[in-house]
Image (cartoon, rainbow, N blue to C red):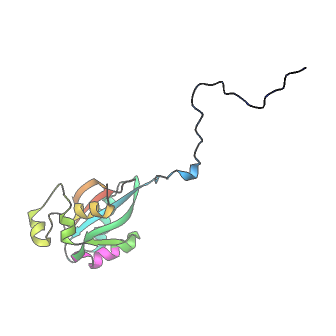
């Protein structure tokens, strides 16, 4: 009489069972282009073309500008508003107290006396980029010496 065959299968491998692969859509995507925030310090009456020239020179070519950030007392400057509109990015404004809480690599006593914070461009860039931001372009002064710009990268 033939022996009945079992439907039960035994595993001959000694290692752990292979893990199921996650679907590609379940993994968070990292942006392929880095996102940058430009912090801008400006004297009253600075023209938009000076702001645009300096910001476009400061932004690294491997990414895109997503925000302009500045001191709240300069947020109503027509040159900054026009520059943000031309670049199609929002203009964020921070108080001197918010910016003074951000450590900057090149503090200025003159800027502190005028605004209440030791640095506008670098602090605004880092603050605008959020937690984990990295300053990638330190404060740069424009040709007319009426505008400064610094760039921070958002954390991927």
Magenta part of the chain: 73-82
Residue farthest right in this picture: 1
**Who's the residue at 29% across and 76% down the image?**
79
What is the chief secondary structure element of the magenta stretch? helix
119 or 148, which lies in front? 119
The spot of residue 80 in percent (x, y) is: 29, 74
**Who's the residue at 25% across and 65% down the image?**
124
The image quadrant that residue 84 belongs to is bottom left
45 or 5, which lies in front? 5
Count of all numbered marks drawn on residues in the image: 0
Quick check: can you spot residue 40? yes
**Who's the residue at 23% across and 60% down the image?**
122
The image quadrant that residue 149 belongs to is bottom left
Residue 96 placement, left or right of 85: left
The image quadrant that residue 21 belongs to is top right
The spot of residue 12 in percent (x, y) is: 66, 24
Quick check: can you spot residue 146? no
Q: Is residue 87 magenta?
A: no
66 or 87, which lies in front? 66
The spot of residue 61 in percent (x, y) is: 39, 53
**Who's the residue at 39% across and 72% down the image?**
86
Residue 3 placement, left or right of 17: right
99 or 144, which lies in front? 99
Residue 101 placement, left or right of 87: left
* Quadrant of the drawing holding the N terminus: top right
């Amino acid at each position: 009489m033939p022996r009945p065959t079992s439907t039960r299968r035994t595993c001959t491998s000694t290692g752990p069972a292979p893990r199921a692969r996650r679907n590609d859509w379940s993994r968070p995507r990292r942006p392929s282009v880095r996102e940058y925030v430009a912090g801008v310090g400006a004297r009253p009456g600075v023209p938009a073309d000076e702001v645009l020239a300096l910001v476009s020179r400061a932004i690294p070519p491997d990414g895109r500008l997503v925000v302009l950030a500045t001191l709240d007392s300069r947020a109503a400057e027509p040159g900054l508003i026009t520059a943000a509109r031309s670049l199609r990015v929002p203009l964020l404004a921070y108080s001197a107290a918010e910016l003074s809480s951000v450590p900057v690599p090149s503090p200025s006593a003159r800027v502190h006396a005028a605004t209440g914070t030791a640095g506008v461009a670098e602090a605004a860039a880092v603050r605008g980029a959020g937690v984990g931001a990295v300053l990638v372009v330190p404060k740069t002064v424009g040709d007319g010496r009426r505008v400064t710009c610094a760039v921070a990268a958002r954390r991927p």
